[in-house]
Amino acid sequence: MTRLTTYNPNRTVSELQREVDSLFDRFFGNASDDNTTWMPSTDLVEYPDRFELQLDVPGIPKEDLNISVQNRTLTISGLRSREQSSEDEELVRVERHVGRFRRSFTLPETVNPDAIEANCENGVLTLALPKTEESAPKMIDVQ
């Protein structure tokens, strides 16, 4: 007797994803380990007068965020700690990353590193990277 099964490409992709996740966990360590490095999601937006860098850092107090600029390299680092659980509480699944993170970005020549401003609100760290006046478009009159 021949048994028919329905082909489900999503099942195949899901199985492959689990295998890849398992391989990475074995090679790099479990992502839920407190010593694991992680990277917050980041958006970069360009405006006529500035760039704006936005990083998702929910649960990280601003005191645990460090921002520095050296040789046109902007470095943002921080630490997210796991909340202390009670003795009778058992973690069943952990998906939120904890531990240290570090992101570095090379600033373009058009950014004034002395005028960078940072603001953290609702779990989003926003850095305003103002452009230099020399980089602003100049209008040329036709003679």
Image: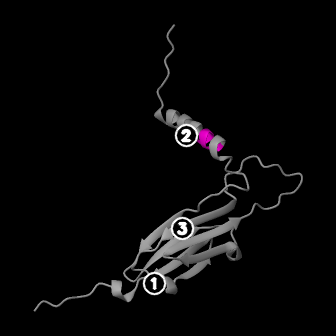
Q: Residue at x 67, y 52 (%)?
A: 95
Q: Horizontal and vertical percent for residue 59?
A: 69, 67
Residue at the extreme top: 1
Q: Earlier in the sequence, mark 2 or mark 3?
A: 2
Q: Horizontal and vertical percent for residue 78?
A: 66, 68
Q: Earlier in the sequence, mark 1 or mark 2?
A: 2
Q: Horizontal and vertical percent for residue 63?
A: 70, 77
- Towards the viewer: 89 or 107: 107
C-beta proximity under 8 Å, tags 1 and 2: no
Check disc 2 and report the residue beneath it.
17
Between the residue at mark 3 and the residue at mark 1, the CA separation in whole angstroms equals 17 Å
Check disc 1 and report the residue beneath it.
112
Tag 1: amino acid? Asn
Q: Which label sits in the foreground, 1 or 2? A: 1
Between the residue at mark 1 and the residue at mark 2, the CA separation in whole angstroms equals 42 Å
Q: Is residue 120 magenta?
A: no
Quadrant placement of the C terminus? bottom left
Q: Point out the stretch of residues depicted in magenta.
A: 21-25
Q: Is residue 24 magenta?
A: yes
Check disc 3 and report the residue beneath it.
104
